[in-house]
Image: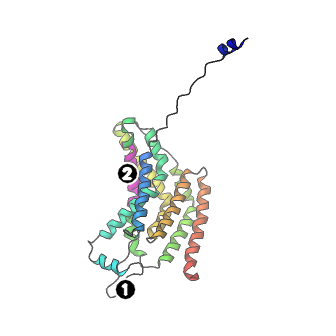
């Protein structure tokens, strides 16, 4: 066969169409988590807030608590009653968006995949609202109980919270809750049944994550403000996210337990060494 025949026998060259980027239905929620992180960092660095741990007011005739400067105490004396609680709860909700929303991304994707296109974002927003409401309610409970530990030495409280979190990581209740966090639920595609189903799934998923991570978030409730709080926040976010996305969540939980126990020991020994 000559060169001309070989050219004619050669199959035509196909041109592949450019691949379209896959849609990311969770993109808005990912951006919301990033925005929450940026807001927390800015508020903490600028000193606009001092963490989610409320400070107990000093009795009459006593000096302010060692975590509260005189200027802060004077400002609190003239502030609106309940403003500190409202500020603490708002900061807690912001930290939940930053820390816990990334762990809910697989569940959000499940809601989006099982919803009609015209109501997909609305269904995902409803799930996220219920999920975050569970964590906000837990934050309100912690703020109500904060006077029980607000007068104790901060290092001792933090060490006890870390030790409690390490112990919880090793319990069978933690393993069951973590397993429930990985479970999905069949959802109706549209109508009022879809709205109710999304709400129930958000409540069930939020409850499972609360049972799994309540001790970790207790650590956030007892930390003070400043750059130290940001460090704990990043470390705990890494633990929560790793447990949610790991192929072997139980092994990740055990590793986290060891790290938390070491951190508890380090926090407890630091005052004695300084």
Point out the image quarter for the N terminus. top right
Could you say where residue 109 lies in the image, as x and y percent from the top left? Answer: 47, 43
Seen from the viewer's position, the closer of residues 185 and 112 is 112
Outermost residue, bottom side? 61
- Left or right of 249, for residue 184: left
- Residue drawn at x 53%, y 28% as measured from the top left: 17
Could you say where residue 41 lies in the image, as x and y percent from the top left? Answer: 43, 63
- Residue drawn at x 38%, y 42% as measured from the top left: 121
Decide if residue 138 is in sight here: no
Q: Quadrant of residue 123?
A: top left
Decide if residue 264 is in sight here: yes
Could you say where residue 70 lies in the image, as x and y percent from the top left? Answer: 35, 81
Seen from the viewer's position, the closer of residues 98 and 203 is 98
Tell me the residue that label 1 is attached to: 63
Compared to 140, does 208 lie above or below?
above
Could you say where residue 2 lies in the image, as x and y percent from the top left? Answer: 72, 12
Q: Which mark is residue 92?
A: none
- Residue drawn at x 37%, y 86% as measured from the top left: 63
Point out the image quarter for the C terminus. bottom right
Which residues are the magenta region?
A: 122-137
Tell me the residue that label 2 is attached to: 129
Q: Quadrant of residue 259?
A: bottom right
């Amino acid at each position: 066969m000559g060169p001309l025949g070989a050219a004619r026998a050669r199959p035509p060259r196909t041109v592949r169409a450019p691949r379209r980027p896959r849609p990311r239905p969770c993109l808005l929620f990912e951006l919301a988590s990033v925005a929450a992180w940026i807001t927390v960092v800015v508020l903490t660095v600028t000193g606009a807030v001092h963490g989610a741990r409320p400070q107990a007011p000093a009795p009459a005739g006593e000096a302010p608590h060692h975590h509260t400067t005189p200027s802060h105490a004077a400002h609190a004396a003239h502030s609106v009653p309940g403003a500190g609680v409202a500020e603490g709860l708002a900061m807690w909700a912001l930290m939940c968006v930053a820390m816990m929303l990334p762990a809910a991304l697989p569940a959000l994707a499940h809601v989006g995949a099982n919803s009609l296109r015209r109501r997909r974002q609305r269904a995902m927003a409803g799930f996220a609202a219920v999920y975050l409401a569970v964590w906000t309610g837990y934050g309100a409970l912690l703020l109500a109980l904060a006077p029980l530990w607000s007068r104790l030495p901060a290092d001792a409280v933090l060490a006890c919270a870390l030790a409690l979190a390490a112990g919880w990581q090793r319990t069978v209740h933690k393993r069951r809750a973590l397993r429930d966090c990985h479970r999905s639920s069949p959802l109706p595609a549209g109508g009022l049944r879809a709205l109710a189903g999304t709400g129930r799934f958000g409540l069930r998923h939020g409850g499972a994550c609360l049972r799994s991570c309540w001790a970790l978030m207790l650590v956030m409730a007892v930390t003070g403000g400043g750059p130290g709080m940001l460090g704990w926040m990043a470390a705990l976010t890494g633990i929560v996210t790793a447990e949610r996305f790991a192929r072997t969540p139980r092994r990740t939980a055990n590793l986290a337990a060891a790290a938390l126990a070491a951190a508890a020991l380090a926090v407890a020994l630091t005052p004695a060494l300084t």
